[in-house]
């Protein structure tokens, strides 16, 4: 079965550079979530989209922005990178039908290293 | 704000013994409680979940119980095996837009 696809899988950037992470949800899933997981920590919710509209916002820095496109893929744009942004970034998708909570399917993650 | 507490942070058991991990959530609007297993550097994998209209759910060696009144839910793994060794996260969802609030994780070691 098709799974969530994330690219790139690994990314190395220098401080103050920008990075773009991409997420392709499972077909027919219209909700996408982004999580950041630092070393030894639990995943922290950043932002979510439902039907191409931002549906919720968590602890996402102002330096980050994201959007969901007409084909439901999503991109997380990160600017002015800091050392503390080094983490695993997971994208998850779900059917996201209104009024119900569904299982979120996680992608393999993008490991971002900022040097 | 929304919060999920998880205990213990580390747990070592002998192969064949049982393991129990407990979580407490703060948001009474939460109605969905998944448990994820995560191996080092890998994605979280759902192992079992429970909705708020159910008190207990079992899948082979894994069971989850939910006490809505106390806002507690627990993961029970019986007959543990070395391959059960991983970090386990509980999560709560259902308030607003269904994002997950994760617990802080439990590192389970099953000793052969």
Image: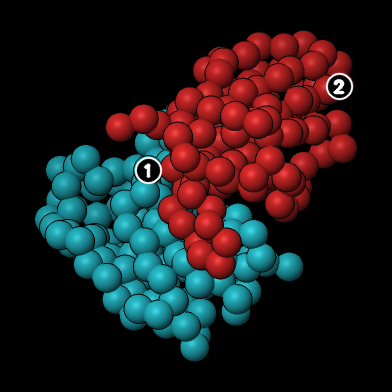
Chain colours: A red, B cyan
In the image shown, does A82 or A36 lie closer to the viewer?
A: A36
Figure quadrant of residue B58 = bottom left
Residue underneath mark 1: B45
Tell me: A4 left or right of B20: right
How far apart are labels 1 and 2 at the CA level?
32 Å
Secondary structure found at label 1: strand
Residue A96 is situated, as x and y percent measured from the top left of the image, at 53, 53
Residue at 47% from the left image edge and 83% from the top image edge: B68
Q: Quadrant of the C terminus of chain A?
A: top right
A18, above or below A94, in the image: above
Marked residue chain, label 1: B
Say which residue appears at 73% left-offset and 34% top-offset: A67
Q: Position of residue A12 (x, y in %)?
A: 66, 11
Q: Tag 2: Cα neighbours inside 10 Å, few (<14), some, or many (≥20)?
A: few
Q: Secondary structure at mark 2?
A: loop
Q: Is residue A22 left or right of residue A25?
A: right
**In this rendering, would B98 be left or right of B43?**
right
Name the chain letter of the residue that bears numbered label 2: A
- Number of marks in the rendered image: 2
Residue A87 picture location, percent across and down: 63, 29
Q: Residue furthest bottom?
A: B69
Residue at position x 48%, y 49% from top? A95
Residue at mark 2: A80
Is residue A38 visible in the rendered structure shown here?
no
Q: Residue at x 24, y 55 (%)?
A: B13
């Amino acid at each position: 079965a098709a799974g969530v696809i994330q690219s790139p899988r690994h990314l190395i950037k220098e401080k103050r550079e920008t990075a773009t992470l991409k997420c392709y949800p499972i077909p027919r899933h219209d909700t996408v979530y982004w999580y950041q997981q630092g070393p030894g920590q639990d995943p922290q919710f950043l932002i979510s989209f439902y039907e191409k509209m931002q549906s919720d916002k968590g602890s996402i820095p102002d330096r980050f922005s994201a959007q969901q496109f007409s084909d439901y893929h999503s991109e997380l744009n990160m600017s002015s990178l800091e050392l503390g942004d080094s983490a695993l970034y997971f994208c998850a998708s779900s059917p996201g039908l209104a009024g119900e909570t569904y299982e979120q399917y996680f992608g393999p993650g993008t490991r971002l290293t900022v040097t | 704000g929304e919060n999920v507490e998880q205990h213990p942070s580390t747990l070592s058991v002998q192969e064949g013994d049982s393991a129990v991990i407990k979580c407490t959530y703060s948001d009474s609007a939460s109605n969905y409680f998944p448990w994820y297993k995560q191996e080092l550097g890998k994605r979280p994998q759902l192992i079992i979940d429970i909705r708020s209209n159910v008190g207990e759910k079992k899948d082979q060696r894994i069971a989850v119980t939910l006490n809505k009144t106390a806002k507690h839910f627990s993961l029970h793994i019986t007959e543990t095996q070395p391959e059960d060794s991983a970090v386990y996260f509980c999560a709560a969802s259902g308030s607003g837009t269904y994002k997950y609030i994760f617990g802080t994780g439990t590192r389970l070691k099953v000793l052969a």
